[in-house]
Amino acid sequence: MSYPRPMERDEVAAAHAAAIAAGQTGYMDPVSGLFVLTAAYLKKRGTCCGNGCRHCPYGGEATSAPS
C-alpha cells in the first residue's frame, strides 16, 4: 500500500485515530478507498504478515507467532 502524500496525511491520521477510539479493527482509507487495519489491531494480532501494512507495529518484517 502506498503512503499518502503530505496533504493527505492529516485525513488518514484522523481516520486511523477515530477507528482506534471506536475500537474498530480498521477504517476505509479516505484517499484510496481501501480498508486499512489499525496499529492496535495489528499489535493485538501478535505477528507481522510481511505485506507492508501502513500501520504495522512490527516494522514490516514478517514475524512468527509468539511461543
Image: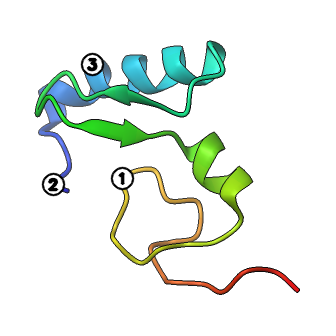
Query: In this rendering, would 8 be left or right of 47?
Result: left
Q: Is residue 51 above or below residue 41?
A: below
Residue position marked by numbered label 3 in the rendering: 11
Residue ID at (15%, 54%): 2
Residue position marked by numbered label 2 in the rendering: 2
Residue position marked by numbered label 1 in the rendering: 54
Determine crowd level at label 1: few under 14, some 14-19, many 20+ residues with C-alpha closer than 10 A.
Answer: some
Q: Is residue 4 above or below residue 9?
A: below
Dot 1 amino acid type? Arg
Dot 2 amino acid type? Ser
Q: Secondary structure at mark 3?
A: helix
Position of residue 4 measured from the top left corner of the image (x, y, whole percent): 17, 40
CA gap, disc 2 to disc 3?
15 Å
Q: Earlier in the sequence, mark 2 or mark 3?
A: 2
Position of residue 29 measured from the top left corner of the image (x, y, whole percent): 24, 29
Determine crowd level at label 2: few under 14, some 14-19, many 20+ residues with C-alpha closer than 10 A.
Answer: few
Residue ID at (29%, 36%): 35
Which quadrant is the N terminus positioned in? bottom left
